[in-house]
Image (cartoon, grey):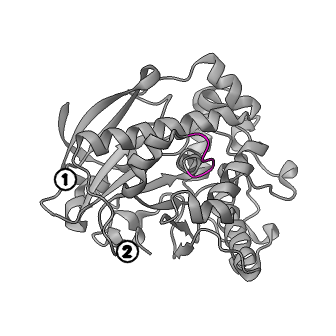
Amino acid sequence: MKTTKASVLSPFSTSFLSMVNYTEHTVKLPDGIELLYTDSGAPNSASYTTLIVLHGSGFNGDGFVPLHEFAHRNDLRVILWNRRDYRGSTKYTDTELEDLAAGRKVFQDRLAMQLAWFLEHFIKHENTLKVSLDHKSGGFILMGWSFGNATTLSLLADPAVLPTALYETIEPYLRSFVLYDPPYTALGYELPGKESVYDPLADPDCSTPEAIYDNFKHWVSSYYTHPDIASGKSSDCEEDLCGLDEIRASCLRATHASDAESAHEALLNERLASSYFPKVNIFHIAGTKTCSYCMWGYMESSRLYKEAVGHGEKVRTTKFKLVAGGNHFVRNLTRPRLSAYLYG
């Protein structure tokens, strides 16, 4: 265990946060998997919630460190993962990368198992609180940022993946999911006309990995104006659309049928909504000035959900929230009223 006091400047903060206190750990899971995470520690409370955050592509969990500053005042214990292939966590094997590039479902299934093992570890070793009877406190909230949602949603996608004993261990503790600005690729959607749009990861003016990454960082952290978010049309997203494969150097990922199947089963399958983690609800957040990949993810998710509910389908309950003026790095999440962005 490593105890850290640090002055942090993050894309998620508006200024330096001095002396943020947290501890750093590495958990050892089955199959030789190790995951590095930072921990705010549990607040002195009998009702706190454990918020587990999974970062996206190209940025590890360190960018979320400012959340530790606001954890206890919001009755939260904040856990920030470093996903596989990022600092301190086990790299993907060549076989896993081949499965990822080919879009094989087994890759998503492994992610689901590893996430379930992590939750099981916390339940057994960290005195995690169960979800309260009124479903308003305790338990786990899983928040995926950007492409991290492909990992979190894998847990809800297929009941055949988790052994019964493991499911029964974690089910009473799993409270809700926050989809924090996922790109449409993480949700398995298609974007009309995507072949003709700009891709910062394939810009011919960027000839080195460093230049490509710098270009990607600039694109994904910029602010965009979308003419009519309510229209549900891809043409009303900012024209600077771009590919966000799981940053090519580390994850090779493209949109595959397995992504679409995983997201659909997790969010819109009536049978699973009532029988597999049936008490888990969804909260989808996006900034009004986020990049178009993520805005299309929000617009399409909202459309599909409203369509399903309009047809009388009893899908997993989902709330949607647009954060005014927010881009892909929604600064509002580091405000003291963090809970307002997690509980809807």
Q: Residue at x 50, y 52 (%)?
A: 144
Look at mark 2 in the image and give the residue it sits on.
340
Q: Which residue is drawn at 30% across and 68% down?
A: 132
Nearest the viewer among 331 and 142 is 142
Q: Where is residue 140 in the image (x, y as percent from the top left)?
A: 37, 56
Q: Position of residue 240 (x, y in %)?
A: 73, 57
Q: Can residue 12 be seen in this view?
A: no
Nearest the viewer among 23 and 10 is 23
Q: Residue at x 27, y 69 (%)?
A: 336
Which of discs 2 and 1 lies nearer the camera? The answer is: 1
Nearest the viewer among 159 and 98 is 159
Q: Position of residue 97 (x, y in %)?
A: 65, 24
Q: Type of residue at label 1?
A: Ala
Neighbours of disc 1 within 10 Å: few (<14), some (14-19), many (20+): some
Report helix, strand or loop for mark 1.
Answer: loop
What is the number of the mark on residue 236? Answer: none
Q: Type of residue at label 2?
A: Ala
Q: Position of residue 96 (x, y in %)?
A: 63, 24
- Where is the C terminus found, in terms of image quarters? bottom left
Report helix, strand or loop for mark 2.
Answer: helix
- Where is the N terminus found, in terms of image quarters? top left
Q: Do the residues labelled 2 and 1 touch (CB within 8 Å)?
A: no
- Residue 295 vertical placement versus 90 (above, below): below
Q: Residue at x 74, y 51 (%)?
A: 260
Look at mark 1 in the image and give the residue it sits on.
42
Give, as a single range, the part of the protein colored magenta.
Answer: 156-161
- Residue 103 vertical placement versus 341 (above, below): above
Q: How far apart are marks 2 and 1 (CA)?
A: 19 Å
Q: Which of the 4 quarters of the picture holds residue 2?
A: top left
